[in-house]
Each structure stands twice: as structure tokens, then as C-alpha cells.
Amino acid sequence: MTMTTTNDLTTQTPAKRRFGGSDLIGLGVILALAVVGYFLFPTNLALLTRIIALALLVLSLDLVTGYCGVATLGHAALFGAGAYAAGIASAHYGINDPLSMLAFGIVAGAVAGLVCGAVILRAHGLPQLVLSIALIHLFHEFANKASSWTGGSDGLSGIAPSALLGLYEFDLWGRTAYVFAVVLLALVFALLRLIVRSPFGMLCRAIKEDPIRIRSMGASPKAALMKMYVISGAVAGVGGALNAISTQVVGLDSLSFTMSAESLVMLVLGGTGSLFGALTGTIVFMFFEDVVSAANPFHWLTMVGALLIAVVLFAPKGLYGTAAAIVARRREAK
Amino acid sequence: MQTVFSIAIDALAYGMVLFVISIGLSVTMGLMRVVNLAHGAFAMIGGYIASYAARDLGLAYGFAIVLAVFGTILIAIPIERLLYRRIYGAPELTQVLMTIGITFCIIGIANYVFGPTLKTVPLPAQLQGSVDLGFRAIATHRLFAILCGLAVAAALWYAIERTAFGVKLRASVDNAAMAAALGVRTEIVYAVSFAVAVGLSAFGGVVGAELLPVEPYYALRYMVTFLVVVSVGGAGSIPGALVACLLLGGIDTTGRYLMPEFGEFFFYLAVIAIICVFPRGLAGRAKG
Amino acid sequence: MQPIFEVRNLKRAFGGLAVTNDVSLSMAPGDRVALIGPNGAGKTTFVNLVTGNLAPDSGEVRLGGEAVTGIDAIGRVRRGLVRSFQVTRLFLDMTPAEHVALAVLQRDGRSGRLFGNFLSMPDVMDEVGQLLGKLGLRDLMHRKVSEIAYGQQRLLEIAVALALKPKVLLLDEPAAGVPQSDTGRIEQALSDLPADLAVLMIEHDMDLVFRFAKRVVVLAAGVIIFDGSPSDVTQDPRVREAYLGSYANASHAA
């Protein structure tokens, strides 16, 4: 391989990386799926809303794990912080406006992101992983102890969101909650598409590949990762708040290791480092859970484990990532 | 004074059990560089086998231990062959996913086979009751656990520092490629270490069943505890692991005695504090 | 002229062994200096001390008249001290355009922007095109780095460094590992470096040193034993001893 030979092979058109065609298609697919879901499962909108709340958590995890390469098993801390903040605002302070509750969720998620980032980013490798697990247990224990605020193991109840924009009551069938959720997901998705393509997104991808090289370009990997953690926290906070508003309870499970691990499974199932992957993984996992745990709850964990092993062995890029790679190869072959 | 003494004995026993279970994890992590989240699951399998052997089949305690150790190794061999082999040298996230997948599977299966209840390993008469030290009485079982920990530490120290296998092991931990070039058959070193690690884990699971009760979520509940021993002690370091176990055992036990209402809060807080201060472990080298 | 880069009495020992011992060096804008020395002379340690990846036991590093000894590696880069790597360290999944754009954006304090894309920032694209054009990488700018030849990767290393608009450039063996047929392109790039830039090149290849450097500094056993013109270096008795004598010493030490 000398330079002259490769020079002749080149001239490729630059891949357009602005918010353009593929993003609009992505948004279109999300909205179309939402409409299909609405008509396909009119009696199960609560499940669809929960899927969207978790999708926000998985998107948030993708930001730090997929785009920045931070391995964490404690990401539910950010989600739970958002859920409890929105819930506590309503249950204890009578702030029942859904958008205000959402704002509380976003801020709490971002603050939790700041705290978790500050701790987790202190180490690398195994110690980093252990820190993330210890953090989620710490958050869990804390919420369990502060039961006058959080309801402890009974869960936080008494959340009563008022009508959305003063117009749309949260109905018994969960229609308002579902539409609210779809709109939030579409907004967050569009925003994240912009962010991952921005200079900052590019910086994060570079940090994932080689943080030391980035330092020699004068950028601080730690500062960038902290920033990403805060953004990630805000996104997870949206998911948490959405869950609190739509279900009107917040349980300790939203701050659990299991939820953290499951969100990682969902992300990997779909494919890391891609927003579509995160969405695909969440949808597939949640439907799978709904079917399997209804049929035999005993085997749910075994199935998740087997699924995880299968993904690692046979589709390490995840469902979406593998599919995208096949499509790309086909295109190249043409 | 009475409390201090009880805490000290319990902490020591707990720390020693942690040591027996985690030391294998530490050595294999230092050797194979695999982040193995499923290590606790092997301790759990050991506990289940011993419980089944001693309680349901009525076998002697010592025999149950032997059965548990070898049974667990037997179960672990195909898992190592089929699954672990694929992730040696893989990125960390892949290793985490694979081993957490294995953990989930083992929990699910244990839950299905043995049910969700707590399983005990009945102690033989010799280990029940207490030993009078003259000024204090200690529960015999605690003393047994401490002695087991000391015996394991001594045996490992001897095996690693004084035997031919130990030399090969240390060389492989240091630089696997170089060791292989010098004629060490690293795959045998890996296989033996993995088997010993699993066996010790099962042994610890049985001996520590009084302190870490055997139930399906055991593997998840103590996952962080075992991992933290390794990351605090530094992978591959026996003295590091010993110090980490005693330290963490002390913190956890003291917390339970003095502030039971706070559960594990202080334990996790201590874990975070220790790792933040020593991000490379107690035995790890400081940053240049 | 006021020196742009200065090292004063820099010392660093590892376990009692002084690897950098009382090294002083001064460079003015536009200087072309080659740092050479036999293996184990302490060149790597010297680079790490200068870039801020290693703290000296004593001594000082000054950049544009300011002491930067207490400033970390990132801060030194931001003040204009930039290095290239001996073995290319590029982001294999990214394109040359992205590399240079990242460096440009970082230099201008815009790398933290959450919106917009460099492909639609005319000023960034102009600079990226210009820099890559100058190094003959323009046609490859949208390919993945993992797909381009090693010699081109080395050129990209130089492009990234230049995009940071350094005042002092440390080139760590810029032609290492490049096939003979491609070194011409790299030498061309080196001779095209901005005239006011101070360049310190660490190099083994003496042909390259003689063609590039106006001044040669020889480091041996942590001490500067020669600092002068390239034409004198081969005649210097201490340099001869260090290189020829080091053979015996090295085998003795091993």
C-alpha cells in the first residue's frame, strides 16, 4: 500500500451529516409506529407509554455508553431521580402541572447525571463499573430510607397531574399520556440527532476512540464526558418524569440495579452508538418481556440472560446495527 | 467492649469468607483480564449443591463441601469452554454483557429448580455452639470460617510463590505473550486457574452460607461486593485482596451492628470513597 | 530574539536514576531543531516532561515567556505547544476532514457546540480543505482513516497538529514506519511548515535530520552533550563516543 495507489482509488462524495433526509425519515418512522401502536393496542396504551419512557432511558444510556464508551450498570439512577423529582413535586408540593413536573424531572435527572458522572468518571475499567453499581445501590438505599419523601418500599403515591396545557385531562385509557409520550420522544429524538452530529458529538466520538489523543489536541475528555452525562441525565429525567406522570406512582424499582442492567441489555440488543438501535432494542425487549413474563414469570430472567448471551455471540452490533451493516454491504456490492 | 469484640469477630469471619470467594476472581481477572460478573453465581451454585447434599441427602458436612466444590467446577467447565473462551480479549462491555447474561441465566435456573426460598447448609455438631477462649466465647462456625480463610490464603501463597505452577502463573499474569514464548502453556495455566477460582468460590459459598445466605438472588446481591474486593485490592494481588476483604468486611459489619436501619448505605458509600481515592486499587500503582 | 520555547535545568529521576539531568534548551520562532540521541538517552522522558505528561523533579518549561511547568498537558496545548505522535494515534472510525475540523473547532473553542455540523460551517470547511489540500489529502477527506495508507496517516498527524495553530511543534519521528517511497511527501510537508513556527523534531533517521534541521541537539544519558550546527555534529568527539561507545555500554547494562 503506497500513497500513489490509494490516491487513485478515492474521490467520494461527502456524506451529508446535517439534519436532513434520514432524520426526517427516522421521525416519520417513530410517528408512524406510534399511530400503528395506538390502533393495534388501544387497550394497552399504558404499556406503550412505559416503553416510550424506557426508550428515553435507553437513549440516555446510549449517549454515555454508545457514544462515549463509558460502561455503566447504574444508569437507572438518572431515570429514578427524574421520576422521584416529578412525583415529589406533585405529591408533596402540589405542583401538578405536567410540564412543570417534567421540568423538575429534567433538572433532577441532570443533577443526578452530574453527581454520577463526577463519581463514575473518576475511574476506568473495572473500578468504573463497580462505582456505577455501588452508586445505583446507594441511590436505592437512600430512596428506601427517605421514606417520608419517597414512600420507601411502598412506592410514592398521591401523584395527581392536572390537565396537560390545561386542556387535556389524563384519562383512564391513557390516551393523553400516550400522545404526550410520543411528542416527548419525537422532540428528544430530534434534539439528540442534532447533538450527536454537532461538533460536541464529534468530540465525544473521538474521546471514545482515544482520550489521550484528544488531550494532546487541547480538549479535556473529562469535561466533555461530564457535559454528556448532564445531557444524558436530562434525557433520562424526561423518561422518569413521563413514567411518574403517566403511571402516577414511583416505585423503588425505578432506582434499581435490575433496571440499570435491563436498560443496558435493551441498548445492546438494539445496537450501541445509534439512536435507532436504542429505540429498536427497547421496543423488542419490552414486547418480549410482556409476552414471556405473562406466560411464565419464573423464566423471565433466564430468557433475558440467554438473549444477552445470544446477542454477544451472534449479533454483537445488535439488531439494528447488524441490519444496518447488512444493508450497507448490499449497497456497496452494487 | 463486648460489642467491639463481637463486631471484630464477625467482621473477621465475614472478611475471610469474602476473601475465599473473591480471591479466585481476583487471580483470574489479573490473569485473563475478563471482567467476570458471574463469579458470585458459582459461589451460589456451591451453596445450593451443599445444601442439597447435606439437607436433602443427609450427607456429612465435609462430604457436602467436597461435592459442592467439584460439582461446581464440573458445571463451570462447559460454561468456560462455550462462553468464556469467546470473550477473552474482547472489549469490556462485551465481557460485562456476557457474564451478566450468564448470571441471569443461573439465577433463573436456580429459582426454577430450587424455588425462591432461602437454603441453609446444616452445620455438623462440632461446628455448632461456641468455643471458650478463656476471656470470651466465639461461635465455632465463625472461627471455622476464619481458619478456612487463613488456610486458603496460606495455601495460595505457597502455590503461587513456591511451586513451579506458581512461577508460570506469575509469568502469565505479568506478560502472557512473553510467558507463552518462553514455553509456558498458558491455556493450561488459564484452565487450572479458572477451575481453582471456581472451586474456591464454591467453597466460600458453602463455608460462608451462615453469613451470606444462599438464595436465587445471591449472585446479584453480592456481585458488587465481590467485584469491589477485586477493584479495591487490585486484580491479581493476594495481599491486596486480603486487606480489601478485611476492610470491607469491617465496614459492612460495623454498619450492620451500629446502624442497622441504614442497611448497606454506608457500605456503598465506603466503596465509592475508597475507589475514588484509590482508582487503581490499594495495591495498584499510583498515577505518575 | 525572544525565545518562544525554553527549557531550564530540567531534571527527572526514576528510582535514583536521573533520566533527564539538568537539560536546558532554548528555541526562537522559526527554529528548526532536531533532537537526536542513542536509544535510552531519555528522549521520550524529555518529550513527556515538555508536554506536561510527566512532572519534573526540578527545572522549568517556558512557553512564550510564560512558565508552564505547573500547567497540565491540555493547558500547554492550548498555549501553543503541540506534539505529533511517533506511532500515529488517529481516530480510525473518523475521516481526515473530521480530524482536522475537530482540531480547528477545538482551537477556536467551538468543540463543545451542541448544534450545527462542521460540514455546513464554511469557515471550518475552508480551513479543512486548505490544510488537507496542502498535504495532498484533499481527495481522501471523507474516507475513514482506517482505509488510508500509513504514509497518509502520518501526513494527517501533521495536518491535525497544524490545525491547532501551534507556536511550538514537537514532531516525534514524523517519518517512522513510512515506506522509503513515501518519505519524500513527508519531507515536503516538513519543509512547507509555517516559517514562524518553532519545530523540535525527534528523529533517528540522520538523512532526514541533515536535510531538515538548522541545529542539532544531542541527548545522551539524560544530558545534552552537543548543541550546534548539523555540520559539526559528526565531528564532535563526545557525540562520537556517545554513539559508538553506547554500543558497549548498552550491552553491558543489559
Image: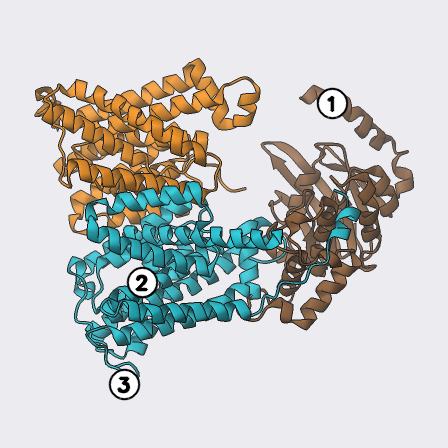
Amino acid type, label 2:
Ile
Q: Which residue is mark 1?
A: C249
> Which is in the foreground here, disc 2 or disc 1?
2
Residue C57 pos. (x, y %):
61, 42
Give the Cα separation between the discs numbered 2 and 1. 70 Å
Q: Which residue is mark 2?
A: A51
Name the subunit of mark 2.
Answer: A
Amino acid type, label 1:
Asn
Give the letter of the cyan chain. Answer: A
Give the letter of the orange chain. Answer: B
In the figure, C115 relative to B139: above or below? Answer: below
Spot the residue most to the bottom. Answer: A167
Quarter where residue A279 is shown:
bottom left
Of C160 and C78, nearer the camera is C160
Q: Which residue is mark 3?
A: A166
Give the letter of the brown chain. Answer: C
